Amino acid sequence: MFKKILIANRGEIACRAIRTASRLGVATVAVYADVDRDALHVRMADEAVQIGTAPSADSYLRGDRILAACRQTGAEAVYPGYGFLSENAEFARQLAAAGIVFIGPDARAIEAMGDKITSKQLAEKAGVNVIPGFPQAIADAEHAVGVAREIGYPVMLKASAGGGGKGMRIAHDDDQCREGFTRAANEARNSFGDDRLLVEKFIEQPRHIEIQIIADNSGNTVYLHERECSIQRRHQKVIEEAPSPFLDAATRAAMGEQAVALARAVDYRSAGTVEFIVDAQHNFYFLEMNTRLQVEHPVTELITGLDLIELMLRVADGETLPIRQSDITIDGWAMETRIYAENPLRDFLPSVGRLLRYREPPASRTVRVDAGVVEGGEISIYYDPMIAKLITWGATRGEAIDAMRAALDAYYIRGVETNIAFLAALMNHPRFVAGDISTSFISEEYANGFTAEHMVPADANLLFAIAVAVHQRMLEKQAGISGQLPGRTANLCRDWVVVNHGHETAVSIDGGSDSFDVDIDDTRYRVRSTWRTGEPLFTGTVNGRSVCVQIERKGIGYRLAHDGVNIEALVLNQRAAVLN
C-alpha cells in the first residue's frame, strides 16, 4: 500500500478520504486555499500545503501547484475526490508523466466518458441501451428543430461537456427548441468552454437510477447494485437511497451487467458510476458515466459493507479486487440527505457565515455523518455550501426513513440557515414515503417553491406539551434555589395557557422532574425525559414514542423545532394570559 497520498480536495470528501487512509496506515497530505487554513481536512491530515487564494481557479483547480505539493511532500499518489480536478484528463496525464499515481481511471477513460456524444456512441457499441437521439453535435437552432421533429417532442437539449444540470433544457415544441438551444449553448459555453449540444428524446416521468461499479487492472469488474437519485431540484440531487424502491431483481441485474459492459469497453479501472434514466415500464437508458466517486456513495457502502475509497486505493496500488459479483449482497436500506447552508424559504439562497453552534446527531449503526466542518468554522462564499451528508440505515425502507427523520431532528446548527426543514418535509411527504417519485417530484409538489405553508406541524399540541413540560422543569429548578423571599418563589401550578401566534391553548400538567402528564383538548401526553435546563435538544418519549425537539428560549417564550417545523410558544399562567 502507498506510504503517503495527497488529497486534492477540501470539505467532507477530503475528510472522508483521510479517515480511510489513516485506518490503512497511509499518511495524508492536505492542500488548502488561504481561507481554508483552519479547515477540518487541514487539521486531520498529517501534512498540509497551501496552494493559493480562495477562488478555486487559483487553488484547488491549479494542477501545477498540486503536482508541486506532491514533489515537496513525497506523496506517491493523488486522491481527487469529486469536483475540481477529479475528471480532468490532462491532470491525470501530468501526474502519470511525473510518476505519481492518480487514484482513479486513466486519462483515456476520463476523456471518453466525459464527452456525452462520445460516451453515448461507446455505450451503444457496447450493447448498452441508449436514449433515441441524434448521434452528433447539433449545428444550430434550426438543425435542433429538425432533429426534434424527427425524434418527436418532448426532447432534451444538453451540453456535451460538463454536468450538474448546466446547459440543459427541455423543449415541447419548435419555439421552445429554438430558445432552449440558444440558452443551453450559452450556458454550456460559459460553464465548460464548450457549446456543443446534443438532442435526445425526453423520457417523461423518469427516475434517475445509477449503478456503482468498480474495476481493477486485471480485468475484474463488478457492480455494487443501484442508487435511486430521483429527488432532484434543478437537476441537482437532494435525496439518494439504495436500493431503489422501483427496481425488480431482473431489471437490477440487466442494468448492472450493462454498466459492467460499458466499463470493460474502455478498459476502466477504479470506481465509477453509470447513470440511467428509467421509465414507468422499467425501460432503462444510458445517461452518462461519472469517472469518479459520487457524492452519494455512502448509501452503497451501508448496504454492501464495503469501503469504496479503500477499494479505490487498493486498485490504484495494483491489487486485484477482493470481491466477486456473487459476494455482493444487499443488506437493508440506506438514505442520504445533503445538509446545505441555504434558506429554502428564500428560493434556497446560499447562507454564508460562521457555524456558531454545530452538533451532529450521534453516530450509530443507523446514523452516519460525513462532514467537513466543525463548530466555529466558516461557510465561505467561494465554494459549494454543503455542510455535510447525513446517511441513515434501516432493515427496511421505512426504518431508514424513520431514522432519517430522527437524525434531522437531532442535527443542531446555528449561525447559518440550513435546508433541514425542507429535507424533513420531503421525508414526511406521502408520495416519497410510498416511493412514488420521479425527477419531477419537487417541481410538481413544490411548484411555487418551499413556503411556510409546508411547515405546519402534524400535531402542534405535542410540541405545546413539551413546551409546558420544559417550562415546569425550569420552574422546579428555580424553586429549589435557596434564600428566596416569601411570596416571590417560583410559581409551580397545574394549569397553563400556551400562546402561539395569538392563539391560546389551555393546558394542565401533573408530575414533576423527569415525568409529566400533560392534558390538552382531552388528550393526554405522557412526557418522559431526563432533559436539563440549558440543553438545546429535548430528547425523551411522548406516549412511548421517541422524540427529539430542538428548544431554546426566545424572550420569555420558547422556540421549538421538530420534524422540519419551527413554532414559538409562550407559556403563561392563567392570570398572565388574561393580561397578555
Image (cartoon, rainbow, N blue to C red):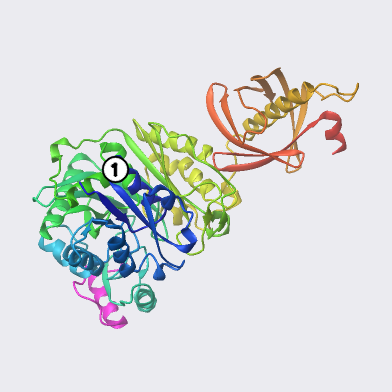
The span shown in magenta is 133-156
For mark 1, what is the residue? 300
What is the quadrant of residue 135 in the picture? bottom left
What is the quadrant of residue 503 in the picture? top right
Q: Position of residue 213 (x, y in %)?
A: 20, 49
Q: Residue 71: tell me if it is visible.
A: yes
Q: Position of residue 567 (x, y in %)?
A: 65, 41
Q: Residues within 10 Å of mark 1 (few under 14, many from 20)?
A: many
Image: 510 above or below 273? above
Image: 425 above or below 53? above
Q: Position of residue 43 (x, y in %)?
A: 44, 49
Which secondary structure lies at badge 1?
A: helix
Image: 214 above or below 506? below
Say which of 477 and 213 sits in front: 477
Outermost residue on the left side: it is 218
Say which of 192 and 171 sits in front: 192
- Residue shown at the point (21%, 72%) measured from the top left: 134
Please state if 15 lies on the left or on the right of 536 as rendered: left
Which quadrant: the C terminus? top right
Q: Residue 244: tell me if it is visible.
A: no
